[in-house]
Amino acid sequence: MKKQLGLTTKVFIGLVLGALCGLFLYKFVPAGTVRDEFLINGVFKVFGKGFLRAMQMLVVPLVFCSLVCGSMAIGDTKKLGRVGIKTMGFYIVTTALAISIAIGIGKIINPGIGLDMSSIQIAETKVAESKPLADVLLDIIPINPVEALSSGNMLQIIVFAILIGIILATLGKKTELVGKFFEQCNEIMMKMTMIVMKAAPVGVFCLIATTFSTIGWNAFTPMLKYIFAVMLALAVQCLVTYMSMLKGFANLSPRKFLKKFAPVMSFAFSTATSNATIPLSIETLKEKIGVSEKISSFTIPLGATINMDGTAIMQGVAVVFVSQAFGIELGLNAYLTVILTATLASIGTAGVPGVGLITLSMVFNSVGLPVEGIGLIMGIDRILDMTRTAVNITGDAVCTTIVAKQENAFDIEVFEDDFSGELEEAL
């Protein structure tokens, strides 16, 4: 039986073939009816933009349902008192830091400079107006939730969904049927996302072919700079942000922690899914690092659902990259909107392939960036996804270790023992 290619491999093949096709058209096919009308503005446009429209179709219902479900789970954290508050606080703060770091590194490296996408036809977009900070914060609160849903005002949708989820969790059995309804709707949207993502290889091929057939070799360097910016931001988040917190709040050795947790990071990198890593993370934290399972059994699954620092980093760099590529100037308040949107949207956006790109289109919409820019990074994003997953689960583990240490649910002898867990593995 032949082994079927995975989605990541198919998307990467679509990326390579699209680039080669685009370069061939750019170099050898003169501008005219066949190249411009039939291919670029015909076949490529229909399938490429059709795929983007399908992703946009999912944004509002997927984000709304997933955030309601995620918030319902978070509503139960009050039963755990300090543990729940500390865990939620850590995850929210690190996500905000992650996207802030990503935007900062993006502005330093400037990955989109030199990539002129102004010749690419885009749908009409409205760049977010520069507003006073007070107005930005007030706009988070929806006056009319129905209008927010119909107009796609993502910050207002996010806030409304989180409030509904928390209230449903507070009411408990009184609203159990309503909660199940949202859970079933979320399952439907996740399934629909998986169906749409099956078309990703074709969509990537058409979008990348359009880019390279229009601007040629000039697309390579900016895309490499984008990859470098994302990887650098991920490294800073993992080695600087997380390890500084581990040392500062738990007074533990970052070097020893990384050495013991490295196998889990490697597994997460190879599988590219946070959910599949949950059992191994809990076991490693208990056997090698000394964290009580009563803490990790709560914080690790919760982190796999809401702690998406790697995705936030991708979104931060992507916003800078696409805004520069299309010549769109974003002000400080626009970047603040990006930080708020990505941080709040991380609640409940489960680690399903493609969801990160769906939420990225939501972030783009919040500041008026063209979703066509997603086509530039979609193919390489699947490769970066493996590194992002390793960073995500490391953040979950660091949070769990800090909380366990502060709650006296931590065995320091296990952590200091360089051979802890090895005897069990040998047996």
Image (tube, grey):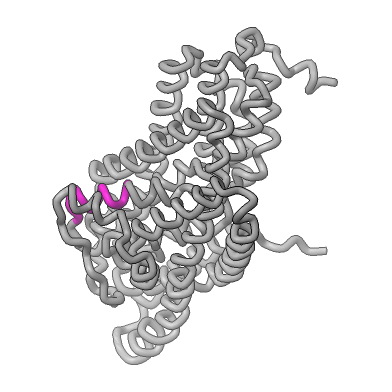
397 is higher (above) or lower (below) than 382:
above
Q: Main secondary structure of the magenta part?
A: helix
Residue closest to the far front: 174
* Relative image position of residue 209 (x, y in whole percent): 41, 72
Q: Nearer the viewer, residue 365 or 203?
A: 365
* Relative image position of residue 283 (x, y in whole percent): 70, 28
The residue shown at (54%, 52%) is 168
94 is higher (above) or lower (below) than 55:
above
- Residue 335: say if magenta: yes
Question: Number of numbered discs present?
Answer: 0
Magenta highlight range: 330-339
Quarter of the figure with the N terminus: bottom right
Residue closest to the far bottom: 33
Q: Nearer the viewer, residue 376 or 209?
A: 376
The answer to whether residue 394 is seen in the rendering is no
Q: Nearer the viewer, residue 223 or 297?
A: 297
The residue shown at (47%, 60%) is 63
Q: Quadrant of residue 412?
A: top right
Q: Quadrant of residue 46?
A: bottom left
The residue shown at (17%, 57%) is 329
Q: Nearer the viewer, residue 109 or 185?
A: 185
The answer to whether residue 213 is seen in the rendering is yes
The residue shown at (35%, 58%) is 156
318 is higher (above) or lower (below) than 243:
below
* Relative image position of residue 272 (x, y in whole percent): 59, 47
Q: Quadrant of residue 83?
A: top right
Q: Is residue 234 left or right of residue 289?
A: left
Quarter of the figure with the C terminus: top right
* Relative image position of residue 286 (x, y in whole percent): 68, 22
- Residue 304: say if magenta: no
